Each structure stands twice: as C-alpha cells, then as structure tokens.
Amino acid sequence: MAKSTFVCWSCRTARELDGRVNRGDACPTCRADMRSCKNCTFYDVTAHHDCREPTAEWVADKERGNFCGYFEPGGKRIDAAAEVASAKAKLDALFKKN
C-alpha cells in the first residue's frame, strides 16, 4: 500500500501513514483524534456544514473522531517560523520609513 503524509490539525506534526485512518486513531504527539473533520481533505469552513462534500452528513464536533464515509486524510504542513518571518517582512515593508 502506498504511504502518504498526514498532518495533525492540532499540533501540525507530520507523519507517514501506511493505510487507513480509523476512528479510534490518535495523533502520537498531542493525542487529538486523527479521523476528524479538521483532518479531512474536504474540511472547509466556508462550505455548508464546513464540508466540501455535498452529500456528507452533518458532524457537530469537527475535532472529534467520527464515522464519515467520505473522510480522506488531508492537511498541510505549516512552518510557523516561516509564516511569522514572512508576516514581519510584509509589515516592515508596509510601514517602512523613507
């Protein structure tokens, strides 16, 4: 089975997955539920029920494990230090005195 990279929504730790993510699986770093809406490719706060899959059932707690049949591991690794440096550079450029 092909390996894929999974990024936890809570702690942003990346890890390799060998297969499926089951409802009881938890992030080894922060213990957050791995099979939750916030870890799904379809999670989108701008979409109806926060999900881009139109036929998915509503899930009340997006951070808890669930049985959604449309779940696909998603998430993007975020480099916080790089984001902070980029934001500071943009602010410095905006408020630069001549």
Image: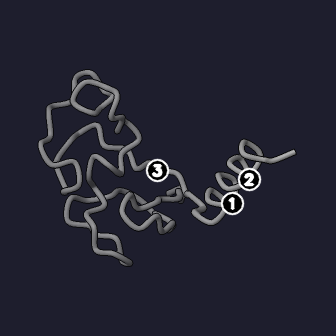
Question: Callout 2: 10 Å neighbours few (<14), some, many (20+)?
Answer: few
Marks 1/2 in contact by CB < 8 Å: the verdict is yes
* Residue 81 higher or lower than 87, as above or below: below
Marks 2/3 in contact by CB < 8 Å: the verdict is no
Say which element carries label 3. loop
User: In x, y percent, where is residue 60?
Assistant: 12, 43
**Depth-wise, is mark 3 or mark 1 nearer the camera?**
1
Q: In which quarter of the image is residue 85?
A: bottom right
Q: How far apart are marks 2 and 3 (CA)?
A: 26 Å
- Pick whichever of labels 2 and 3 is earlier in the sequence: 3
Q: How far apart are marks 3 and 1 (CA)?
A: 22 Å
* Residue 41 higher or lower than 14, as above or below: above
Residue drawn at x 87%, y 45% as measured from the top left: 98
Which residue, given by chain and number where applicable, does mark 1 sit on? 85
Residue type at mark 2: give it: Ala
Residue drawn at x 38%, y 78% as measured from the top left: 29
Residue drawn at x 22%, y 48% as measured from the top left: 62
**Depth-wise, is mark 2 or mark 3 nearer the camera?**
2
Say which element carries label 2. helix
Q: Which mark is residue 58?
A: none
Residue type at mark 3: give it: Gly
Residue nearest the observer in this picture, 82 or 28:
82
Marks 3/1 in contact by CB < 8 Å: the verdict is no
Residue drawn at x 36%, y 51% as measured from the top left: 39
Q: Which mark is residue 75?
A: 3
Task: List the single residue furthest toward the bottom.
Answer: 29
Residue type at mark 1: give it: Ala
- Pick whichever of labels 3 and 1 is earlier in the sequence: 3
Q: Which mark is residue 89?
A: 2
User: In x, y percent, where is residue 37?
Assistant: 27, 46
